Amino acid sequence: MQRIVAVSDVHGFYDEMMAALKEANFNPETDLFISCGDAMDRGSQPRQVIEFLNSLPNKVLIKGNHEQLMKDAIKRKCFLSHDIHNGTAHTAYDFCTKENAGLMNHAQILGELRDDPEYQKYMDLLVNYYETENYIFVHSWIPGGTDWRCAPQSKWDKAMWGNPFDIASVVGNKTGKTIVHGHWHNSTGWWRNGIGSKFGEDACFDIIEHDGCIGLDGCVAYTKKVNVLVIEDELI
């Protein structure tokens, strides 16, 4: 049996992630670390998060919609309004080490990020999902159909945007395994179970089991909390 330590939606909050991993007694030499995407944007330490993930000897790094947002910005060579709102622009500037970064235009900043070795390494390691004997780890959901494992990238890119609480309750998890996901703050699931509100002082952002799934997103930008799931399972 392999001990697995999984997080999701760290969003550049390095200190909060490390505190949570310490509390979970994470051992990088023996544990399998799984990130379910959205490691960057919003927090103030995206480079530190990416460098840490790259350094781990036993890891699976899953692509999230914020990784896709950055790829899109690099391709168009400029930031749009949602890049400012979602923290994508902040991440790009944080990766730039030049003293005159504040005077550089969007294309220059995004070019610096594109060519950064740590960023390149991280993006090259990304996968759409990871599967063990009893679990499927994704960012949000899987593409529809029985052949979801072989779905084209375009369908995976669409699936990572869906609300997993809505999809799981309507479509259902038909994989025969527990789907572990992030992407959507867990207070939604707790609220639907009659616990707390979606946001507010009484909202609950703890790890939640629902509809054959496990939600991890603790909405760290709001709560300053990274949820850590620790399980044991056979690898395949």
Image (cartoon, rainbow, N blue to C red):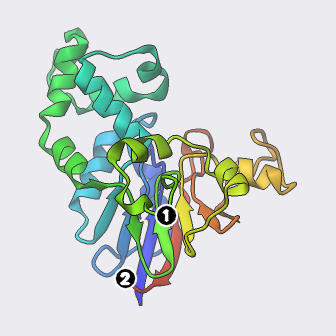
| Up/down of 198 relative to 90, above or below | below
| Up/down of 223 relative to 33, above or below | above
Evaluate whether residue 201 shows in this view.
yes
Q: Residue 235 has which mark? A: 2
Check disc 2 and give the amino acid type. Answer: Leu
Name the quadrant containing residue 235. bottom left
**Mark nearer the N terminus (1 vs 2):** 1
Along the line of sight, the residue nearer the viewer: 28 or 165 = 165
Evaluate whether residue 97 shows in this view.
no
Q: Where is residue 4 drawn, in percent x and y?
A: 43, 76
Q: Residues within 10 Å of mark 2 (few under 14, many from 20)?
A: some
Residue that extends furthest to the bottom in the rendered view of this protein:
1
The residue sitting at 44% across, 59% down in the picture is 148
Say left or right for 48 vs 140: left
Does the CB distance between marks 1 and 2 fall below 8 Å? no
Check disc 1 and give the amino acid type. Answer: Thr
Q: Residue 105 has which mark? A: none
Along the line of sight, the residue nearer the viewer: 226 or 82 = 82
The residue sitting at 44% across, 37% down in the picture is 43
Q: Residues within 10 Å of mark 1 (few under 14, many from 20)?
A: few
Say left or right for 20 vs 89: right
Q: For the residue labelled by badge 2, is the local secondary structure a helix, a strand or a loop?
A: loop
The residue sitting at 55% across, 65% down in the picture is 179
Task: For marks 1 and 2, give the one nearer the viewer.
Answer: 1
Along the line of sight, the residue nearer the viewer: 115 or 97 = 115
Q: Where is residue 236 drawn, in percent x and y?
A: 35, 82
Name the quadrant containing residue 201. top right
Q: What's the distance in space between the residues labelled 1 and 2, CA to CA?
A: 22 Å
Q: Which residue is mark 1?
A: 146
Q: Where is residue 16 drawn, in percent x and y?
A: 48, 52
